[in-house]
Image (cartoon, grey):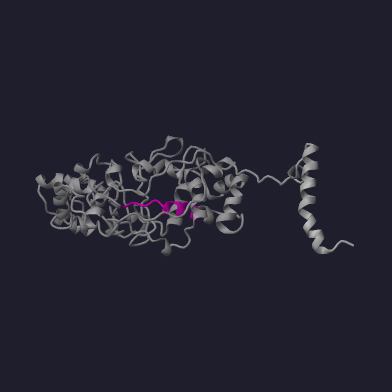
């Protein structure tokens, strides 16, 4: 009788003999028991993989620990949704149509264009460092109270994406390829408008701006700003009073001010309020003090997104600064800090140079090449 020890010692020889016999027969162990090949990911997944959350650049207020709802899986899903034109009523408009990466997630048009070539009355504000505002108010008039709420608005605006939330969901339910990514992002494959908005907002939260020449100078690099930009910096934070509204790391107080844009004296005998082409914040609050008031925009990457103001009425940064040097139009609700601004025409180039020094990095992206099907 063969002992256990002698059997174990014979196993290597038996295995070698079996392998030789299989080779002589033109077979191999792998051919006898093939391993199932792992399925290849769909092409849209390879084009848009899950990536770690970005490291905030110097000077950015971003801190992802304070927004735990932003996860890599939601960002990946939101990136598709942000660029997917199928979410509009006619398949021609996406969030990125008006929030273009190359223009600091704003646009180079005076006002936004939507489906069927319709043109709105306001320019898209930028989406940079947007998840860390001083006050959670979004849009020029502050009608949204969160990034998620902001993401929902353009979908059902008749002159933007021109859809309804129900229409967006019908489209997404018809795209089977989206379902596994909702499951990865949210734990199950339910698709609803709140999840759509949260995923888009998560992607927007990763569009950061920092490491500008100003940030490097502020961190101790004396050579980062030119002498002209340094002069502009001193004016900006001093006598010109720009920082009264453009404050903090995002250069905005997230508040609403009438800076004299979009108001013209009405005909004699008509109330002054009739001179406003756009009521601004008043449309939300119905408070007469908010007539003509608009949210202070971030100045991060401002040189990338001409023309300027809520109505795109000013073509250059020089024109913007000249507007304040002239105290703006004498609108009824003109903000006090605009009226008190003090600098000379000769100091305008310095202020422009400083504004140009606020262009940074951290937001570059390009549309996905392929979307879930």
The one of 273 and 210 positioned closer to us in this rendering: 210
Q: Nearer the viewer, residue 365 or 329?
A: 365
Residue 303 at x, y = what percent? Answer: 27, 44
Q: Position of residue 310 (x, y in %)?
A: 30, 47
Say if the magenta span includes residue 199: yes
In this image, 31 relative to 132: left or right? Answer: right
Height in image: 185 above or below 16? below
Q: Is residue 322 visible?
A: yes
* Range of magenta residues: 197-210
Residue at horizontal 46 percent and vertical 63 percent from the top: 68
Q: Quadrant of the N terminus?
A: bottom right
Res. 122 in view: no
Main SS category, magenta section: helix
Task: Say which quadrant the C terminus sits in.
Answer: top right
Q: Nearer the viewer, residue 41 or 177?
A: 41
In the rendering, at what x and y percent does residue 190 appear?
A: 61, 55
Horizontal and vertical percent for residue 150?
43, 54
Q: Residue furthest top?
A: 117
Q: Looking at the image, which residue sits at the far right? A: 1
The residue under the point 45% across, 46% down is 157
Relative horizontal placement of residue 36, taking residue 141 as reference (left or right): right
The residue at the point 56 percent across, 45 percent down is 45
Q: Closer to the camera, 83 or 94?
A: 83
Residue 344 placement, left or right of 187: left
């Amino acid at each position: 009788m063969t002992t256990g020890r002698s059997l174990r010692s014979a196993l290597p020889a038996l295995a070698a003999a079996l392998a030789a016999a299989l080779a002589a027969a033109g077979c191999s162990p792998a051919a006898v028991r093939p391993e199932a090949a792992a399925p290849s990911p769909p092409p849209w997944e390879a084009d848009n993989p899950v990536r770690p959350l970005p490291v905030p650049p110097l000077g950015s207020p971003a801190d992802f620990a304070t927004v735990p709802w932003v996860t890599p899986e939601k960002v990946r899903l939101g990136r598709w949704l942000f660029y997917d034109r199928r979410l509009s009523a006619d398949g021609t408009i996406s969030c990125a149509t008006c929030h273009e990466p190359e223009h600091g997630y704003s646009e180079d048009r005076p006002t936004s264009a939507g489906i069927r070539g319709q043109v709105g009355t306001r320019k898209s504000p930028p989406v940079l460092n947007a998840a860390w505002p001083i006050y959670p108010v979004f849009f020029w008039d502050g009608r949204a109270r969160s990034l998620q709420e902001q993401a929902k608005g353009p979908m059902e605006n008749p002159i933007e994406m021109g859809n309804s939330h129900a229409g967006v969901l019908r489209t997404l339910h018809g795209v089977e390829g989206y379902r596994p990514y909702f499951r990865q992002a949210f734990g199950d494959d339910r698709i609803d408008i709140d999840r759509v908005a949260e995923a888009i907002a998560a992607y927007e939260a990763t569009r950061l701006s920092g490491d500008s020449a100003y940030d490097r100078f502020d961190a101790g690099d004396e050579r980062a700003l030119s002498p002209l930009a340094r002069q502009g910096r001193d004016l900006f934070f001093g006598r010109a009073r720009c920082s009264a509204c453009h404050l903090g790391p995002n250069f905005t107080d997230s508040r609403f001010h009438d800076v004299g844009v979009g108001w013209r004296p009405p005909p004699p005998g008509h109330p002054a309020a009739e001179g406003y082409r756009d009521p601004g914040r008043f449309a939300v609050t119905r408070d007469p003090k908010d007539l003509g008031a608009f949210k202070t925009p971030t100045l991060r990457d401002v040189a990338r997104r001409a023309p300027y103001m809520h109505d795109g009425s000013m073509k250059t940064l020089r024109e913007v600064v000249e507007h304040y040097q002239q105290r703006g139009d004498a609108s009824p609700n003109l903000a006090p800090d605009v009226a008190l601004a003090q600098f000379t025409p000769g100091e305008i180039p310095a202020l422009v140079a400083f504004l140009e020094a606020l262009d940074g990095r951290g937001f570059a992206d390009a549309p996905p090449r392929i979307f879930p099907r």
